[in-house]
């Protein structure tokens, strides 16, 4: 029936021919017979200007114009066997079209409904109208209708809509669409009490690509970055390009900071791999800031601002890293600016000193090299470690004058050592990338008279992420000087292994992150360390393990072939005077001791935290912590096996069990391991939900800084289950906020 001729399907009674008027003249209005009208309609159908369709009483297609039928694709065979709404599928973005089945079922007329005809292999969009047909006895005969092909119009509108919502260069969502998506997601998720994460990404050293290789290369690079971001996110969220080298990722139903950290790490890693563009090869980096709704913001403006602050902190922290938003980041930015000012003053006042950490040959326990450590003696802060101020110095480029002074001073000191002792010095990417760095090193060596072969410059893998030609040239210049080059913290960075083949490194340094406890081995990833040792051996390089604090770890490293070790297991950094005293006795040897048995993975801290036990809340001191446990001080006579909840502030609660007790100090094990916070610290996977606080009567807001215990408020002067030690902080009387 569907293939019947149009004239046979739409049978109508022929009208009599138009008669002439009494005077023989034609009538004022031309009249056509039904046959003539039918012929006109057939011609319109043949030309494709008009299309027709019909259904039987069951709603199954009984007639369809050939122009539409040929666009049905795989649905052609079943076209006259299934209901009309299965052939003409409503478009997802057209709510009105979704009523097609209802219209047919209720036998009501409809007009201008937008549908897609056929399957995915076809490209045909129609605007259809129809009316029910009834017989002489009012029996329902089916629908008759028309269809207009609007494919070209629809595709044009679709492209215009796409251009309004998507970035033309990368195909990612643009700023406008991302704002709409964030707004709609947050609004929907608030009602459903769901979480969503927002990642802000900024490319590092992208401007150099534009400046050196041109904007065309920059555009190619951005397109490749978009592809890599899609790989990293793996369909878990929507990615947008806000403009320039700024990107944004919205991930719904995600508040696990461990998972978010892994996504950020993967994005940083994959984006930082070398790129090939028409103008040559280049390498960039990436920094990431992370904020989570509702913890860090309820509305889009607040959430975006929080992610921006976290991104700013990650870039200031040294780039190529991620940071979670914290309520104290604004305060941190203020402190950072003050530290920059104080560093500038300290340079002029000469308030810097350097110390040296021994590097020991494991086969003989002899000290073979000394690594430079920066020390800053500040009037207000006291002794400031290099881990604290070096990121600030690098971000402000103050590392250039500090680094030049330190290199000159260290070379002068090394000239007083035996020739068998090498000087090792860590070089930041800012120093390495500065114009004339190799020349500056050459000048200092000439001025001080230090043999270049005794100077070992340590470069982190991030140094290699700059322009490949410039990096190769700088490495070549340093090699020609005769200095040794060490790839520091190998395996924790993002460089290509091809650099090991092309660059003149003599040593691989394995960072302390390799020795974090892993499943099946409390000493860390020894299998991976073995692989690094084998790689170094195959390439004729020495190996050095840093951050070794335990005797059992040192013994294991020696067993698998590590050549040299640095860490508290042998010695911390010492001043020049101590070095001179030791070398007067001849060959300097060090025996490993248990004094440094504190695990490398355990970070030394000293700050006030909360401790919750039953209905009591105590203020205690956190002395150190690792992923799996911590040491706290402030309570006496606490039995082994006691369970606590530690309140780290900002909604971070960690359930733990006492495993060791020593007077007023307890070693506790976490029920769930902490995760990397991106800033060299640790944080809990989850936080107290603002939704839970709102359910308890608090207003729904982002978490401000402070304490959020789930323990009942303890009254001042209430009976304390555990006795406080003299070292306990002043008690606040109960859970605190703000």
Image (cartoon, grey):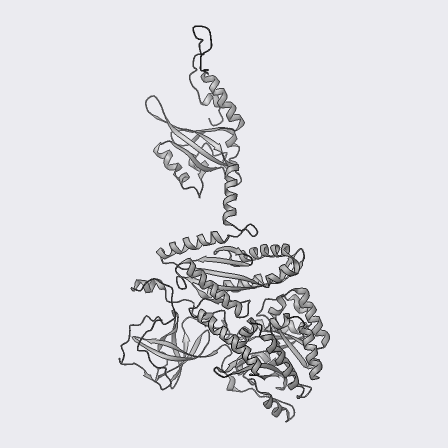
**For the view shown, which residue lies furthest in the top direction?**
23
| Residue at x-position 61% and y-position 70% | 461
Task: Look at the picture and state if 290 lies above or below 670.
Answer: above
Q: Could one spot residue 535 in this view of the protein?
A: yes
| Residue at x-position 51% and y-position 25% | 44
Task: Look at the picture and state if 529 lies above or below 379.
Answer: above
Estimate the x, y position of residue 266 in percent, counting from the top left.
53, 63
- The reply, left or right, for residue 531 in relation to residue 145 is right
Q: Quadrant of residue 395?
A: bottom right
Estimate the x, y position of residue 14 in percent, counting from the top left.
43, 15
Q: Quadrant of residue 733?
A: bottom left
* Residue closest to the eye, 375 or 715: 375
Estimate the x, y position of residue 513 in percent, counting from the top left.
54, 73
Query: Looking at the image, how many numbered discs can be counted on the residues?
Result: 0
- The reply, left or right, for residue 710 in relation to residue 360 is left
Task: Look at the picture and state if 689 lies above or below 488.
Answer: above
| Residue at x-position 51% and y-position 26% | 45
* Residue closest to the eye, 170 or 313: 313
Q: Could one spot residue 274 in this view of the protein?
A: no
**For the view shown, which residue lies furthest in the bottom direction?**
585
| Residue at x-position 66% and y-position 66% | 498
Task: Look at the picture and state if 587 lies above or below 691.
Answer: below
């Amino acid at each position: 029936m569907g293939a019947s001729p149009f004239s046979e399907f739409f049978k109508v009674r022929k009208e009599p021919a138009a008669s002439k008027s009494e005077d023989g003249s034609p009538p004022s209005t031309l009249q056509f017979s039904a046959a003539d009208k039918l012929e006109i309609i057939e011609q319109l159908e043949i030309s494709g200007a008009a299309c027709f369709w019909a259904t039987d009483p069951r709603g199954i297609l009984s007639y369809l114009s050939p122009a539409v039928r040929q666009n049905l694709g795989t649905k052609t065979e079943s076209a006259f066997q299934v209901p009309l709404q299965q052939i003409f599928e409503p478009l997802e973005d057209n709510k009105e079209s979704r009523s097609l089945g209802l219209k047919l079922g209720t036998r009501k007329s409809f007009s201008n409904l937008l549908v897609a005809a056929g399957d995915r292999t076809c490209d045909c969009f129609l605007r259809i109208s129809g009316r029910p047909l009834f017989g002489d006895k009012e029996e329902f005969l089916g629908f008759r209708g028309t269809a207009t092909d609007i494919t070209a119009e629809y595709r044009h509108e679709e492209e215009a809509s796409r251009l309004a919502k998507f970035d033309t260069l990368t195909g990612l969502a643009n700023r406008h669409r991302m704002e709409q998506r964030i707004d709609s997601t947050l609004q929907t998720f608030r009602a459903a009490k769901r979480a969503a994460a927002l990642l802000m990404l900024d490319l590092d050293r992208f401007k150099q690509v534009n400046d050196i290789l041109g904007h065309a290369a920059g555009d190619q690079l951005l397109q490749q970055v978009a592809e890599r971001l899609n790989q990293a996110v793996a369909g878990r969220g929507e990615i947008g390009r806000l403009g320039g080298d700024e990107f944004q990722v919205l991930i719904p139903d995600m508040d696990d900071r461990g998972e978010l950290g892994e996504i950020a790490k993967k994005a940083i890693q994959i984006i930082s791999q070398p790129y090939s563009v028409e103008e040559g090869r280049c390498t960039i980096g990436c920094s990431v800031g992370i904020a989570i709704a509702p913890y860090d913001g309820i509305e889009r403006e607040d959430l975006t601002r929080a992610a921006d602050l976290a991104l700013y902190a990650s870039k200031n922290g040294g780039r190529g890293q991620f940071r979670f938003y914290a309520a104290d980041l604004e305060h941190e930015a203020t402190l950072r600016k003050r530290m920059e000012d104080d560093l500038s003053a300290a340079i002029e006042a000469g308030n810097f000193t350097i110390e040296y950490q021994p590097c020991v040959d494991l086969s003989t326990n002899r000290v073979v090299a000394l690594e430079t450590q920066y020390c800053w003696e500040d009037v207000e802060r006291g002794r400031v470690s290099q881990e604290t101020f070096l990121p600030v110095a690098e971000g402000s480029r103050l590392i250039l004058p500090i680094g030049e002074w330190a290199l000159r001073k260290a070379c002068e000191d090394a000239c007083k050592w035996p020739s068998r002792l090498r000087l090792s010095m860590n070089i930041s990417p800012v120093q390495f990338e500065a114009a004339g760095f190799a020349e500056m090193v050459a000048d200092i060596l000439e001025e001080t008279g230090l043999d270049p072969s005794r100077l070992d410059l340590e470069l982190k893998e991030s140094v290699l992420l700059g322009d490949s030609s410039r990096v190769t040239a700088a490495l070549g210049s340093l090699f020609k000087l005769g200095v040794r080059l060490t790839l520091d913290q190998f395996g924790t960075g993002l460089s290509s292994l091809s650099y090991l083949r092309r660059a003149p490194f003599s040593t691989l340094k394995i960072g302390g992150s390799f020795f974090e406890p892993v499943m099946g081995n409390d000493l860390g990833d020894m299998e991976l360390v073995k692989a690094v040792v084998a790689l170094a051996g195959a390439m004729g390089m020495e190996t050095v393990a840093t951050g070794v604090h335990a005797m059992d770890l040192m013994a294991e490293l020696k067993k698998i072939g590590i050549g040299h070790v640095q860490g508290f297991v042998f010695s911390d950094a010492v001043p020049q005077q101590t070095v001179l005293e030791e070398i007067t006795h001849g060959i300097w040897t060090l025996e490993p001791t248990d004094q440094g048995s504190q695990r490398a993975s355990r970070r030394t801290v000293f700050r006030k935290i909360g401790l919750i036990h039953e209905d009591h809340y105590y203020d205690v001191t956190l002395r150190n912590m690792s992923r799996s446990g911590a040491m706290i001080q402030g309570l006496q006579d606490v039995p082994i096996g006691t369970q606590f909840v530690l309140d780290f502030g900002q909604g971070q609660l960690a359930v733990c069990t006492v495993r060791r007790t020593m007077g007023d100090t307890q070693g506790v094990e976490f029920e769930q391991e902490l995760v990397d916070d991106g800033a060299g610290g640790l944080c809990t996977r989850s936080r107290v939900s603002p939704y839970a606080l709102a359910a308890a009567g608090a207003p729904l807001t982002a978490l401000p800084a402070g304490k959020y215990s789930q323990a009942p408020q303890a009254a001042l002067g209430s009976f304390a289950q555990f006795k406080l030690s003299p070292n306990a902080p002043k008690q606040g009387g109960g859970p605190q906020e703000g």
